[in-house]
Image (cartoon, rainbow, N blue to C red):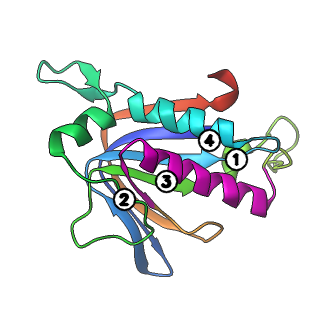
Amino acid sequence: MKAVVQRVFDASVKVQGALCGGISRGLLVYLGVARGDTEADAEKLAEKIAHLRIFNDEEGKMNLSIKDLAAERREPPVFSAEAPAEAPLGILAISQFTLLADTRKGRRPYYGAAAEGGAALTLYECFMRKIGEQGLACRAGIFGAHMELRYTNDGPVTIILDSGEL
């Protein structure tokens, strides 16, 4: 399982022009599920992402995690694809099979390493549940849909994680 994690001031996702998820300050996570990935991979990534110390403390050092920020705000965890009127601090998780692209040959990426739709959906949902179990709000796009994302990078700070390397 691969994840691209971006620190953001805000992020939202629309499908067919309708807003389906959004966060205020937090993390935008693109998640790619590979063949052979398991719930253990989803749990490892969720735990790692929740505890990544990539937010600035009062001295301007990257020393705080998203969990630290959520604890300061005392916001309840939410797992929902619906964007509330006021988006929470949290994580916006976007399924992205293209993270598993193999571009070693030719000009067209090969996606054979990506998990099949049903298995990928199951693990994507598992990842989001595990984020919620970390006490964090988690919003989502719509699995398999063409999505429009808008976000404002903070930093920018971008981290690439692979569950096989954790």
Q: Which amino acid does label 4 sit on?
A: Ala
Which stretch did the figure color magenta?
A: 115-139
Residue at the spot of label 2: 78
User: Sequence-wise, which precedes: disc 2 or disc 3?
Assistant: 2
Q: Is mark 3 on a helix, strand or loop?
A: strand
Query: Which numbered disc covers residue 42?
Result: 4
Q: Position of residue 83 (x, y in %)?
A: 34, 70
- Spatial CA span between label 2 and label 1: 22 Å
Picture residue at 26% right of the left edge, 57% below the top: 88
Q: Nearer the viewer, mark 4 or mark 1?
A: 4
Q: What residue type is labelled 3?
A: Ala
- Spatial CA span between label 2 and label 4: 18 Å
User: Sequence-wise, which precedes: disc 2 or disc 4?
Assistant: 4
Task: Name the dominant secondary structure of the magenta segment.
Answer: helix
Count all numbered tags in the image, as a single digit.
4
Q: Is mark 1 on a helix, strand or loop?
A: loop
Residue at the spot of label 1: 33
Picture residue at 17% right of the left edge, 21% below the top: 60
Query: Which numbered disc covers residue 93?
Result: 3
Q: Magenta includes 105?
A: no
